[in-house]
Structures are given as C-alpha cells and as structure tokens.
Image (cartoon, helix red, strand yellow):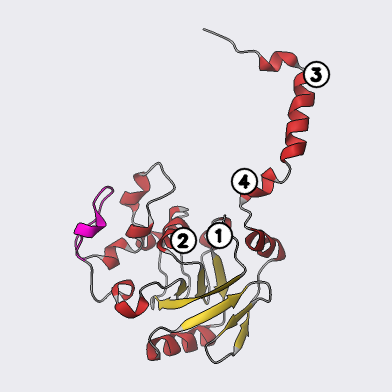
C-alpha cells in the first residue's frame, strides 16, 4: 500500500448528499474477480450518457459534459470534496478501490458511512471529516477558483488552503500509523514474518504428520 504523508492536489467537488456505493461503482462491475480496473467506471452512471458494463471500452463511451469529473478544470484531481453521508448503501469494498484507482488520495466530507470509512483506510485512502460549515466554505472556494488545490499533511493532521490557512482534523492513531507507513492488513501481518516462519517450523517438527499429502 502506498504511504500517505503529505499530499497536494486539485480538489473535485461532488455536491450531493447521501452518495451511495452503487453510484460510486455500479453493481454490474462487481462481477470482476480482480481488484483492478475499476477507476474508469467510477461514478459510471453519472459520468457517461450511455450504459456501461464490464469489458466495454471507456474510449467508446459518451462522456456526460455536465459531470464534474469530465470538466477540464478538474482533470487530474486527487482530492474529492463531498457532502453528508458519503459512501452509504452496500458495503462493497469496490467503492474505495474505484476512487483510489481513479487517482484520488483523500476525501473530505462532513460525514461518511461507517463501513465505507473503514474500507478507505484499508486501501490507502484518507477520509477526512470536517464540520458542515467548513466543507461548505471549501465548496464555495473550489467553485470560485479553477485549479483549486489543498495540501494535506497527515503527520501534522492539517489541511492547508491556498492562502496558508490550516484546518485541523482528527484521525485514529493506529489508522494514522498504518497510512504513514503504507501498511494494509497484509502488511501488518508480514511485519511478523520471522515469528510466523519460526512457529510453522516448530509446529512441523512436533507434528510432522501435518505435512503429509493424502492422495485419492
């Protein structure tokens, strides 16, 4: 998992409340047995005018010119600004996969659905919760200034605006540690690889029959 320390990026606003995971990545794309390839289908039904399905080449699609991610000023955005209860609905982990694979590193909203919030941390995304009034002000500033960028310093737990104003945010210490060090659940386990190998070797010495392969 990629480390998150300090990130600076263009902000893209999704000015809708209660954006559910089926809007983030529609159900037909969940058929994939892979963990990759979801970025082109992020917000698929809002992003394109024609219906999409697995295997359909995004280059052949009809982009919706009114959707925020299709507007030139938001190209290359890596910070997503959202409204209340972002990520509600089903618990599909494909939603943070699609957001991360599109190119976003962080999300800012007044609130997130619990399971989606947890899944973000497990996939290297930083979801930041800020007060409604602060988020509303950010929406106004993003709309007023093309190319609006924020800097997010996870170590200091601050969002830095273009004028240098800093906005503090909370993050659980363990989640902060994992993001700063690029550790997902597998990475956390592999820190103890030597102990795991030693345990397996000792167990096999005590119970050699565990290594037998039964045929038929």
Residue 83 seen in the figure: no
Q: Earlier in the sequence, mark 4 or mark 2?
A: 2
Residue 148 location, quadrant: bottom left
Q: Earlier in the sequence, mark 4 or mark 3?
A: 4
- Tag 3 residue: 206
- Number of residues whose C-alpha sits closer than 10 Å to that of mark 3, classed few (under 14), some (14–19) or many (20 or more): few
- Tag 4 residue: 186
- Tag 1 residue: 124
Report how far apart the C-alphas of labels 4 and 2 lie in the structure.
Answer: 18 Å
Query: Are circles 4 and 1 on residues that touch, CB within 8 Å?
Result: no
- What segment is highlighted magenta in the picture? 49-62
Query: Which percent across, then down, holds residue 87?
Result: 46, 64
Inspect the magenta stretch and tell me whether residue 60 lies in it: yes
Report how far apart the C-alphas of labels 3 and 1 lie in the structure.
Answer: 40 Å
Q: Earlier in the sequence, mark 1 or mark 2?
A: 2
Residue 7 seen in the figure: yes
Residue at (56, 67) in percent of width and height: 126
Query: Are circles 1 and 2 on residues that touch, CB within 8 Å?
Result: yes
Report how far apart the C-alphas of labels 1 and 2 lie in the structure.
Answer: 8 Å
Q: Is residue 140 left or right of residue 112?
A: left
Query: Are circles 3 and 2 on residues that touch, CB within 8 Å?
Result: no
Query: Which percent across, then down, holds residue 71?
Result: 29, 77
Query: Which percent across, then down, holds residue 23?
Result: 35, 63
- Number of residues whose C-alpha sits closer than 10 Å to that of mark 1, classed few (under 14), some (14–19) or many (20 or more): many
Residue at (39, 72) in percent of width and height: 76
- Tag 2 residue: 100
Q: Look at the numbered disc 3 and give the secondary structure of its residue.
A: helix
- Number of residues whose C-alpha sits closer than 10 Å to that of mark 2, classed few (under 14), some (14–19) or many (20 or more): many
């Amino acid at each position: 998992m990629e480390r998150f320390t300090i990130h600076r990026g263009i902000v893209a606003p999704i000015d809708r409340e209660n954006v559910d995971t089926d809007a983030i990545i529609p159900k037909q794309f969940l058929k994939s047995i892979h963990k990759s390839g979801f970025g082109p289908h992020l917000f698929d039904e809002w992003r394109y005018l024609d219906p999409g399905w697995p295997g359909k080449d995004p280059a052949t699609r009809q982009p919706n010119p009114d959707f925020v991610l299709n507007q030139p000023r938001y190209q290359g955005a890596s910070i997503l600004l959202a409204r209340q209860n972002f990520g509600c609905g089903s618990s599909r982990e494909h939603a943070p996969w699609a957001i991360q694979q599109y190119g976003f590193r962080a999300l800012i909203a007044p609130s997130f659905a619990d399971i989606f919030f947890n899944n973000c941390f497990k996939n290297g995304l930083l979801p930041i919760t800020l007060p409604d009034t602060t988020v509303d002000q950010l929406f106004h500033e993003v709309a007023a200034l093309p190319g609006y960028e924020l800097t997010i310093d996870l170590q200091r737990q601050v969002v830095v605006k273009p004028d240098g104003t800093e906005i503090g945010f909370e993050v659980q210490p363990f989640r902060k540690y994992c993001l700063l060090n690029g550790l997902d659940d597998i990475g956390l386990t592999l820190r103890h690889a030597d102990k795991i190998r030693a345990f397996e070797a000792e167990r096999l010495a005590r119970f050699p029959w565990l290594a037998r392969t039964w045929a038929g």
